[in-house]
Amino acid sequence: MIRIDRDRTGGMRVTFFLRPDTPRGRVSVVGDFNDWQPGAHELRPRSNGTRSVAVTVPEGTDVRFRYLGENGHWCNETEYPDVRQVGEDSVIRVVAPRRSQDDALTDASVPAPRPRTGRSSTGATARAPRPRTERASTGSPASDARSRTGRSSTG
């Protein structure tokens, strides 16, 4: 797995992650950024159970790399979607990641959503129910029943 982000100096930080035992033992990431030197960038255990190491390169760089484990065990990056295989090597172009919609929604610079209004999803304004008014009784049970149903005696 790989994560790409900008470091404090403006360079691009590429962090390489591996699962705890894939491959077993000590593992280094080697590539053109460290002259393919084993041990120069050894992945270290993290509290979340993964192992990782970060390198910094200029933005736009094509980084060619492989993972080298103990006893000469080589493996390639298979989980990051933007990595392509060139010969036996993994290659990735290092560019600043695009902000996802989720990132934009959690960004402090984004204004908070406005409070809900009385409008429905169709745009109609919701109305509060009208208060019931009592009608004066005429004294006749039939006329009182007609006035409650809205019908008149004339039809």
Image (cartoon, rainbow, N blue to C red):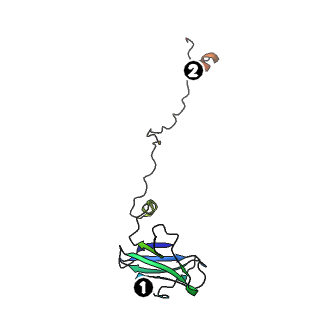
The quarter in which the C terminus is drawn is top right
Location of mark 1 (residue): 34
Q: Is residue 11 left or right of residue 42?
A: left
Q: Which mark is residue 94?
A: none
2 vs 1, front mark = 1
Q: Is residue 16 left or right of residue 111?
A: right
Q: Is residue 77 above or below residue 124?
A: below
User: Element under label 2?
Assistant: helix
Q: Is residue 84 above or below residue 34?
A: above
Q: Is residue 39 above or below residue 46?
A: below
Q: Which mark is residue 147?
A: 2
Q: Residues within 10 Å of mark 2 (few under 14, many from 20)?
A: some
Give x and y (percent) for residue 99.
Answer: 41, 64
Say which amino acid is labelled 2.
Ser
Q: Is residue 24 left or right of residue 108?
A: right
The one nearer the camera, 45 or 136, is 45
